[in-house]
Structure formats: C-alpha cells, structure tokens
Image (spheres, rainbow, N blue to C red):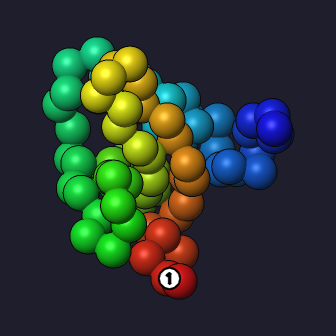
Amino acid sequence: MGLGKPYAICRSWTSLTRIIATVETFAETGRGDVRRLGNAEGEYRLRVGNWRVRFILNHKSHLVVVIRVLPRSGAYTR
C-alpha cells in the first residue's frame, strides 16, 4: 500500500508540508496537540490547524504510524 498522491491528502502544498513537519516534530519530541481517542484502542489524534491526523503510537519500536489525515469536518464522523 503506497502513500498515494499528496493532493489526495490535501490540496495545498503548504498544508501538506505543515502536516508532515508537525508529525515529525511530535515523533521526535512528543510535543503537539495530541489526544487519545476513547472509541479506538491505541489510537491518537494530532491536531494541525484544520486537519486531524489519526495515528497509532508504538512504544516498543518508537514509531508513529499514521492511519489517516482528514479535514476537521470529516475527522470525527463514523
């Protein structure tokens, strides 16, 4: 499974680079607007402006596995 086209994630190159930079900063420092998602076991949400990054944090291997990147309006719908 590939990453897909960057524009499928977000239309703005500036937004995409900001999202990537924020995820990298969180992975390195642990800082960011992160909340654990109560309805999904082991999943977290990172807020980047109007975007929401859902990810799994693997403590053993120190990995941040990004599951989805969605605009705020669609991030919390089932």
Residue 39, x across and y down, in percent: 33, 74
Query: Which quadrant does the N terminus fall into?
Result: top right
Residue 50, x across and y down, in percent: 41, 59
Above-or-below relation of 21 to 50:
above
Q: In terms of depth relative to the viewer, which is nearer, 26 or 11?
A: 26
Decide if residue 29 is in sight here.
yes
Q: Is residue 19 left or right of residue 5?
A: left
Residue 55, x across and y down, in percent: 44, 46
Rendered image quadrant of residue 37: bottom left
Numbered disc 1: secondary structure: loop
| Residue at point 29%, 28% (across, down) | 59
* Number of numbered discs overlaid on the protein picture: 1
Decide if residue 73 is in sight here.
no
Above-or-below relation of 55 to 43:
above
| Residue at point 52%, 41% (across, down) | 66
Residue extending furthest toward the bottom: 78
Q: In terms of depth relative to the viewer, which is nearer, 34 or 51?
A: 34
